[in-house]
Image (spheres, rainbow, N blue to C red):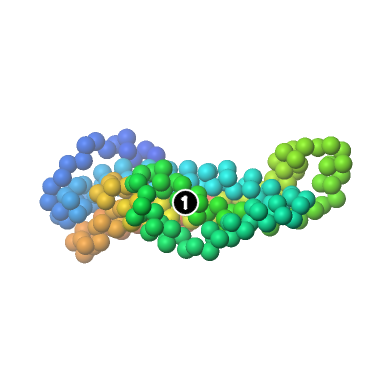
């Protein structure tokens, strides 16, 4: 239920939103009142989830598309130097705080969803690679894998036919955390104005821009904040249940 509500609103909500008109700011008009530029909060809530949820999912997908192969290369490397070449640059990126990366990007990069996806992927890939590599190292050292090598199996088949299925529980558990982390970074990017315009219909932007009217129209801040929290908690609960199964 926690995951279903924000997901349904994010997917279906924009279909029920027309052209949003502007009026007086922070007045009790409509169901949830108006925001800092006089737009109907309910319409913004219905139309503001697709960007937050969508970008978080796309960024997570990009992170896995890049991180999992790198982790497999490092874990299955038979030469120590190859593991070092993969992991040491990632350690440097991992040492830089994610919010610092967002602040730097906000000052030099063009605003847009593509920028946010790239930044989130760059920030999350190093940690993902370390987690998957740690799980895959034990699998890569098993006698069964060595026997498959001697039988002439290709590296691709060994990696994706044996190692990946063996570490699948770790991947599933990490996926829930990774989506939540991506959502946090996407929301932070919205606060900093990296991904969307300062007055965009976006849950993260709504939380940030409507703080001045928190005691006038609290729904303009509380409702999108609760939807973001529900999405984060719901994702982790779903993947925790998947791991147990």
Can residue 174 be seen here?
Answer: no
Can residue 102 be seen here?
Answer: yes
Residue occupying image coordinates x 54% and y 47%: 63
- Direction from residue 114 to residue 41 in the image, left or right: left
- Direction from residue 245 to residue 55 in the image, left or right: left
Residue occupying image coordinates x 21% and y 62%: 212
Q: Is residue 185 above or below residue 156?
A: below
Q: Secondary structure at mark 1?
A: helix
Q: Is residue 31 above or below residue 221?
A: above
Give how far across and how far down residue 232 sits, in percent: 46, 55
Q: Label 1: which residue?
A: 120
- Direction from residue 217 to residue 3 in the image, left or right: right
Give how far across and how far down residue 73 sits, in percent: 69, 48
- Residue projecting furthest to the left: 24
Q: Quadrant of residue 107?
A: bottom left
Give how far across and how far down residue 157 sits, in percent: 74, 38
């Amino acid at each position: 239920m926690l995951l279903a509500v924000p997901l349904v609103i994010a997917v279906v909500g924009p279909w029920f939103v027309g052209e949003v008109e502007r009026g007086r700011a922070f007045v009790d008009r409509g169901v949830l009142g108006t925001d800092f530029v006089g737009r109907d909060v309910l319409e913004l809530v219905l139309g503001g989830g697709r960007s937050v949820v969508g970008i978080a999912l796309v960024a997570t997908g990009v992170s896995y598309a890049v991180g999992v192969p790198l982790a497999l290369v490092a874990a299955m490397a038979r030469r120590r130097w190859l593991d070092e070449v993969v992991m040491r640059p990632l350690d440097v990126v991992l040492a830089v705080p994610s919010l610092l990366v967002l602040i730097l990007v906000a000052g030099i990069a063009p605003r847009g969803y593509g920028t946010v996806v790239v930044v989130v992927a760059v920030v999350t890939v190093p940690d993902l690679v370390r987690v998957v590599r740690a799980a895959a190292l034990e699998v890569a050292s098993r006698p069964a894998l060595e026997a498959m090598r001697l039988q002439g199996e290709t590296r691709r088949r060994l990696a994706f036919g044996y190692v990946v299925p063996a570490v699948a529980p770790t991947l599933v558990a990490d996926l829930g955390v990774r989506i939540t982390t991506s959502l946090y970074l996407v929301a932070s990017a919205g606060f900093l104005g990296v991904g969307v315009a300062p007055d965009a219909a976006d849950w993260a932007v709504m939380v940030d821009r409507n703080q001045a009217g928190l005691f006038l129209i609290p729904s303009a801040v509380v409702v999108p904040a609760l939807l973001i929290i529900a999405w984060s908690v719901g994702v982790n609960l779903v993947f925790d249940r998947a791991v147990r199964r």
